[in-house]
Amino acid sequence: MPDVYPLTSGDATLIAHSVDGVFIFILAIASFFFLLTQGFLIYFALKYRRRKGIEQPTPYITGNTVLEIVWVIIPSLLLVAIFGYGMVVFLRMRTPIPGAMEVQVTASQFQWSFKYPDGRTALNELRLPVGKPVKLIMTSKDVIHGFFVPAYRQKQDVLPGRYTYLWFLPRQAGSFDLYCSQYCGTGHSIMRGKILVMPVADYQAWEEREEQKQKGAAASPVEKGEKLFQDSGCLGCHSIDGTPKVGPTLKGIFGSTVVLDNGKTLTADEEYLRESIVDPNAKIVKGYQPVMPTFKATLKDDDVAAIIAYLKTLK
Ligand code: HEC
Ligand SMILES: [Cu+2]
């Protein structure tokens, strides 16, 4: 799976193009009036310049009511239009779609830490599935930082002792730069991250792998072994409290003396336990039937080691 996806065509997020729309709208109005006023300025400067031989007194104008009404009303209407358009887009930008996936963001000098809903954490890299709304709930450990994703046209201050939020719906797979937009200290310029938006199937595969990894890393062999022991049906035939069932109890099995059906005795060590699990019929315990199935195919070497670690704790 690549770490960087090529940008597919389309808008980066659901609202990114709306922000551009507001920007272009304001830019167009401003450009129009800039050209209009500068045009008149140049025109008048040329038209009424002082010319040799022509003595023309400047007309004395005290007011023009119609003109004044026009230049108050038109700009006012335009400002209301800019406000209205901006407000509509702003409200869309600030109102999360219900059911958005929530990610906790903690900023600190000088890194971004992300916590996914399942508890996994990541540093400076936020992976998201394309097409799913996300809500970031953000706070800072120290000073004021700013969460800024230029491609998403979104920026939000991240404050210590307070939550702020930001939401978006990524529409495009790809890698998007994340910057800190507040000068937060000497390392401010290295406070950068990435938002990696992945196709849904890739995201799910990645998520599963990560969960597996974290589970494996977090659980000790004993915990893992106990879980496997319960999940593999061992308890159907073995007790852990001393009572015999279809098979002998596994309480205190490690280090105990086992009597086999051929009269021999041995001390149950790791190798004996391993063999009993992957090749149960190699040695049969006296008084029991050779009915234990082999777990050679279902349990990996790691799993067997974990179960043995667990069996050792059954004193
Ligand atoms: C269908 C019932 C059954 C299941 C399920 C089963 N066992 Fe057994 N197991 C037995 C029987 C019967 C014996 C004794 C006969 C023999 O040695 O094969 C035995 C023996 C053992 C022994 C040797 C015990 C001793 O006292 O020397 C170990 C260790 C063991 N099993 C571990 C396991 C583990 C771990 C699992 C689960 C992964 C498991 N068994 C699942 C029936 C079962
Ligand atoms: Cu910062």
Image (cartoon, helix red, strand yellow):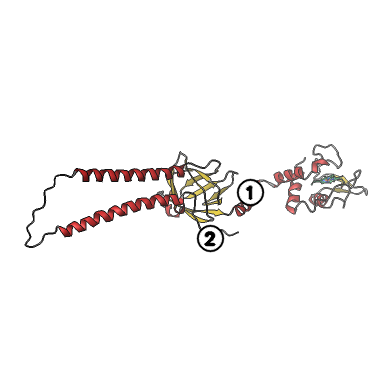
- Residue 309 percent coordinates (x, y): 74, 47
The quarter holding residue 103 reads top right
Nearer the camera: disc 1 or disc 2: 2
Q: Is mark 1 within 8 Å of ligand 1?
A: no
- Mark sitting on residue 6: 2
Q: Is mark 2 within 8 Å of ligand 2?
A: no
Q: Judging from the image, what secondary structure is the residue with disc 2 in?
A: loop
67 sits to left or right of 183: left
Front residue (pair 262, 98): 98
What is the quadrant of the N terminus in the image? bottom right
Q: Residue at the front extreme?
A: 66
311 sits to left or right of 211: right
- Residue 136 percent coordinates (x, y): 51, 44
Q: Residue at x 27, y 43 (%)?
A: 73
Q: Residue at x 29, y 45 (%)?
A: 74
Front residue (pair 276, 103): 103
Q: Residue at x 71, y 45 (%)?
A: 222
Tell me the residue that label 1 is attached to: 211
Amino acid type of the residue tagged 2 in the rendering:
Pro
Q: Residues within 10 Å of mark 1 (few under 14, many from 20)?
A: some
